Image (cartoon, helix red, strand yellow):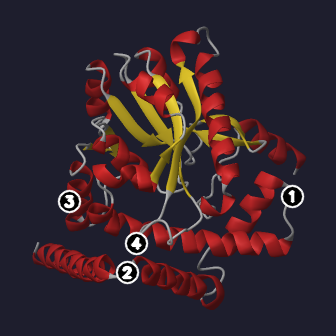
Amino acid sequence: MRDFRQLINAERLRHVAEYVAFRVVVCLVDILPVQTSIRLAEAMAFVVHRVLPKKLTRYAVARDNIRQAFGRRYSDREIDDIIRRMWVHLFRVVVEIVQVRRKLRLYNCADIVQFRGRDETVRLLCSGRPVIILSGHFGNWEIASGTFGMFGFPMGIVARDLDNPFLHRWFERFRRQTGHSLISKRGGGGDMLDMLERRGHLGLMGDQDAGSTGLFVDFFGKPASTFKSIALLALEYRAYIAVGYARRLPDDFERNRWVRYEIGYADLIDTAAFDGPDAVRQVTQRFTTALERAIALAPEQYFWVHRRWKSVPKQRVRRNRAAA
């Protein structure tokens, strides 16, 4: 019992230390000029891409994923550059999440965000039916959700609980600043159902491997395990699915003091138009294909180190075993 208490205290001390370090970094990043923070992100990306061991940074996973997605479209040198720019993008996303609280306001939103397909999206959000805003680990998903909240469209953001409870509460407060609520990915099914029953809106990711029990649909031409719960919920509650993205645009600091983003949608799916035993597969394939189109707009802004094709369909596993 004493050892257990010591273990709990040690874990709490580690969480506190992580949180203090995190807040120090947040304070430093928050006061940096924008262009200085970009150079910092580029320097950190250089360290990850060129200095750290490639095994540690999952370089081979990212390279193979890009090759799988785009075939021979890119040379080895171009793929290496996409991976380098991916790291620059990810570090810039971290900086922008910190700075967005004081940089993005309702009065300057039009200077920072270009909303492609705004009228169609707003029409869905005001339709009286629930809407699932579906995205992937592409662009800056926090910019997109913050913009919707700023314009009076709060939603339940579905995300995984962070292991550090202090960091988790910080991100929870961050999302609530724009009117959103945080729904735990683990054990939050009841909250999601309540939100949809009240014709509320959900924001979630749809590009992660769902394991052996997921529904296999084509993602860049190769079967990928995908969560079928998204389509099941949307079909049950007649929810629209808006497959959206927030893509960073080229920097132009002569005209704008901060970064600029294009928020848009790759597809607007009316699930009420789907019926029959294959409806779940059809909806899942359609939003997965839409995510492909969004990623193709700026491949360097996608998180390629995720093992999207990790799970293999059971038929293929059986076939491989039989051949052996």
- The answer for how far apart the CA atoms under marks 3 and 1 are is 43 Å
- The answer for how far apart the CA atoms under marks 3 and 2 are is 27 Å
Q: What residue sits 64% from the left and 36% below the top?
A: 290
- Label 3 sits on a secondary structure element that is helix
- The answer for how far apart the CA atoms under marks 1 and 4 are is 31 Å
Left or right of 127? Residue 174 is left
Q: Amino acid at mark 3?
A: Arg
Who is closer to the viewer here, 122 or 92? 122
Mark 2 or 4, nearer chain start: 2
Give the numbered dot on residue 73: 1
Mark 1 or 2, nearer chain start: 2
- Residue identifier under label 2: 33
Q: Amino acid at mark 1?
A: Arg
Mark 1 or 4, nearer chain start: 1
In this picture, is 56 found above or below 64?
Answer: below
Q: Is residue 159 visible?
A: no
Mark 3 or 2, nearer chain start: 2
- Residue identifier under label 3: 169
